[in-house]
Amino acid sequence: MSDNLVSALIAATVSIIVGLIGYAATVRTAAHERRKLERELTRRFTERLYDLRVKHYARAFEITERLGKHGAMAVDVQPLYKEIRAQLREWRSGRSLSVSLSTH
């Protein structure tokens, strides 16, 4: 074989190897960036969900706050419990439930 042909084959082989290494590095970097963006997106959605829960669950805490106020008293608490249950069901059927369900 002539020296020119050998040189051309070596140059072609080196070019192919460098191209493959560059391609593998690009694919790996792209996959890493995609995973990083997915984690960031998940973190942002989770953060937003927590903010919405804090905002909307405050009403549920207000409703149930009266549960502990009657402790060992001899008062008939059943009407109070029924009222609280009705208020919680009304609260749950509103925006708070849709916030939790729409994020999953």
Image (spheres, grey):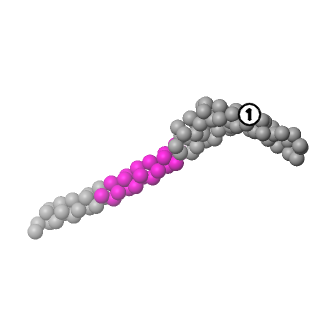
Q: What range of the chain is rendered magenta? A: 20-41
Q: Residue 94 vs residue 64: left or right? A: left
Is 72 covered by the magenta stretch?
no
- Residue at the (41%, 52%) spot, across then down: 31
Q: Residue 77 vs residue 59: left or right? A: right
Rendered view: 12 above or below 47: below
The residue type indicated by label 1 comes to Glu
Main SS class of the magenta portion in the image: helix
- Residue at the (54%, 39%) spot, across then down: 101
Task: Compare residues 63 and 33 and report the one nearer the observer.
Answer: 63
Taking the view exactly as shown, the residue that stands out farthest to the right is 73
Q: Residue 35 vs residue 92: left or right? A: left
Quarter residue 23 falls in? bottom left
Task: Compare residues 70 and 41 and report the one nearer the observer.
Answer: 70
Q: Residue 77 vs residue 95: left or right? A: right
Rendered view: 103 above or below 26: above
**Is residue 72 shown to the viewer in this render?**
yes
**Is residue 55 shown to the viewer in this render?**
no
Task: Compare residues 47 and 6 and report the one nearer the observer.
Answer: 47
- Residue at the (87%, 40%) spot, across then down: 75
Residue identified by numbered label 1? 83
- Residue at the (52%, 43%) spot, across then down: 104
Task: Compare residues 49 and 32 and report the one nearer the observer.
Answer: 49
Q: Tell me where residue 26 appears, x and y as whole percent.
A: 37, 52
Is 34 covered by the magenta stretch?
yes
Q: Tell me where residue 24 appears, x and y as whole percent.
A: 35, 57
Q: Tell me where residue 56 appears, x and y as whole percent.
A: 67, 34
* Secondary structure at numbered mark 1: helix
**Label 1 packing within 10 angstroms: few (<14), some (14-19), many (20+):** few
Q: Tell me where residue 21 appears, x and y as whole percent.
A: 33, 59
Taking the view exactly as shown, the residue that stands out farthest to the left is 1
